[in-house]
């Protein structure tokens, strides 16, 4: 009997693919009879690439424009089969572009949580237990969409599958070559997000880095004869287009010589960099989700939003500042105070967090 071909749509950000990985792995464990394909974006391609899939189909960066013009998606590589048995939109929130993408994929049956898309005869609407994805772990939301579409209970399998992405040898080699041999404690700083509303004001990050490293510098001088516990190096992560902003942040610090700016070659490669760190400080972004997936001690500066949905569960050594007191973005003094609390709690657990 020929295996059913299933197409999963994940044309969004890298953080969303991290939330999808456990559900995807649970599906592979529960239904090895299925031939699984994933339609992905450039943002999340590196996360999904090592997974044992029948096909990984990379959308062109211009796919949204092509959908509007022709009604058909444009692929940069790995064009999918002409027809699938089942196509499933994994996005829990409705987006017109993804509705159009689902319409452009040829499949006998289609499933989606978007009411706007579920108007054709072969498109079935899936629902959430609460009527909305809000307030529930996003991975469970995604698993629920797949479970309803394929009549398979994935929630019983989810606890047994890993949540972090698979790193390839070239990722580990890149991180080792760029970062060098490790001495002392290292701290990663990830001040940028792929979604503009989650990017905090740069001036606050500059002031935070200045005050945080200045305090560390004074403590280092006080403890130098005892081999104190200050971080020996700091790493600022971003994309090449963030270079000038990162340079300004580094120049603002009295420890600028101890701060290295890094541009990993892919989001998956960033995981290899972060795994060498003793802690990660980040905004609400893919890097923060990546650090959590590896169980790394992390301090998250959020900007409001649904914490129960996107940051479900408790990671050891984690502190999340949900929003600022007077603004959705925490003020510098709030960031510094949260950092001190996080650092004090981490130090209490012993050296190296």
Image (cartoon, rainbow, N blue to C red):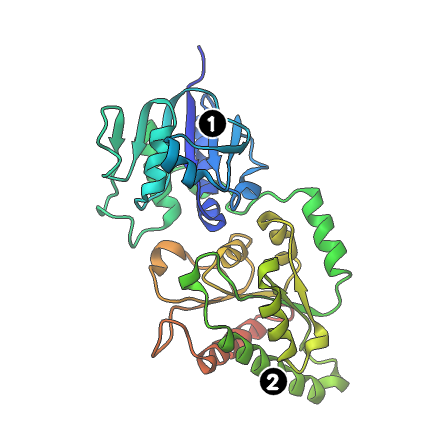
- Measured as percent of width and height from the top left, residue 224 is found at 74, 85
What is the quadrant of residue 100 in the picture? top left
Q: Residue at x 32, y 51 (%)?
A: 136
Q: State which tag comes first along the sequence, 2 or 1.
A: 1
Q: Residue at x 66, y 88 (%)?
A: 218
Q: Residue at x 37, y 48 (%)?
A: 138
- Label 2 CA crowd tier, 10 Å (few <14, some 14–19, many 20+): some
Q: Nearer the viewer, residue 47 or 73?
A: 73
Q: Which residue is mark 1?
A: 36
- Measured as percent of width and height from the top left, residue 21 is found at 48, 41
- Label 1 CA crowd tier, 10 Å (few <14, some 14–19, many 20+): many
Q: Which mark is residue 215?
A: 2
Horizontal relation, residue 281 to residue 258: left or right: left
Inspect this view and state whether residue 155 appears: no
Horizontal relation, residue 191 to residue 152: left or right: right
Inspect this view and state whether residue 276 appears: yes
Q: Quadrant of the N terminus?
A: top left
- Measured as percent of width and height from the top left, residue 77 is found at 56, 32
Q: Is residue 137 above or below residue 301?
A: above
What is the quadrant of residue 20 in the picture? top left
Q: Residue at x 52, y 46 (%)?
A: 43
Horizontal relation, residue 18 to residue 166: left or right: left
- Measured as percent of width and height from the top left, residue 178 is found at 73, 57
Q: Is residue 342 above or below residue 24?
A: below
Residue at disc 1, secondary structure: strand
Taking the view exactly as shown, the residue that stands out farthest to the front is 69
Q: Is residue 135 above or below residue 245?
A: above
Q: Is residue 71 above or below residue 263?
A: above
Q: Nearer the viewer, residue 132 or 349?
A: 132
Residue at disc 2, secondary structure: helix
Number of numbered callouts drawn: 2
Mark-to-mark CA distance, 2 and 1:
52 Å
């Amino acid at each position: 009997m020929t295996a059913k071909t299933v197409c999963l749509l994940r044309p969004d950000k890298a953080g969303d693919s991290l939330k999808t990985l456990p559900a995807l792995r649970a599906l592979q464990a529960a239904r090895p009879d299925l031939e699984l394909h994933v339609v992905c974006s450039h943002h999340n391609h590196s996360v999904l690439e090592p997974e044992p899939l029948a096909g990984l189909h990379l959308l062109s960066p211009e796919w949204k424009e092509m959908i509007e013009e022709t009604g058909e998606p444009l692929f940069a590589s790995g064009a999918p089969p002409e027809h699938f048995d089942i196509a499933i939109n994994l996005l829990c929130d409705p987006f017109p572009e993804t509705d159009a993408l689902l319409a452009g994929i040829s499949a006998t049956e289609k499933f989606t949580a978007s009411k706007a898309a579920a108007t054709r005869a072969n498109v079935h609407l899936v629902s959430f237990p609460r009527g909305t994805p809000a307030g529930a772990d996003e991975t469970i939301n995604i698993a629920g969409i797949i479970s309803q579409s394929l009549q398979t209970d994935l929630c019983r399998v989810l606890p047994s599958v890993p949540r972090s992405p698979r790193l390839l040898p070239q990722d580990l080699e890149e991180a080792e070559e760029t970062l060098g041999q490790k001495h002392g404690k290292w701290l990663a700083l990830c001040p940028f997000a792929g979604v503009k509303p989650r990017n905090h004001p740069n001036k606050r990050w500059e002031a935070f880095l200045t005050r945080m490293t200045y305090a560390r510098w004074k403590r280092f001088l006080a403890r130098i004869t005892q081999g104190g516990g200050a971080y020996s190096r700091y790493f600022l992560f971003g994309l090449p287009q963030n270079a000038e902003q990162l340079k300004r942040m580094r120049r603002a610090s009295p420890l600028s010589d101890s701060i290295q700016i890094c541009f990993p070659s892919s989001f998956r490669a960033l995981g290899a960099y972060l795994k060498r760190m003793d802690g990660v400080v980040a905004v609400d972004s893919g890097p923060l989700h990546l650090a959590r997936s590896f169980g790394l001690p992390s301090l998250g500066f959020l900007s409001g939003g649904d914490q129960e949905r996107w940051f479900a569960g408790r990671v050891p050594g984690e502190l999340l500042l949900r929003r600022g007191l007077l603004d959705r973005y925490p003020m510098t003094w709030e960031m510094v105070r949260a950092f001190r609390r996080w650092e004090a709690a981490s130090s209490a657990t012993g050296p190296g967090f």
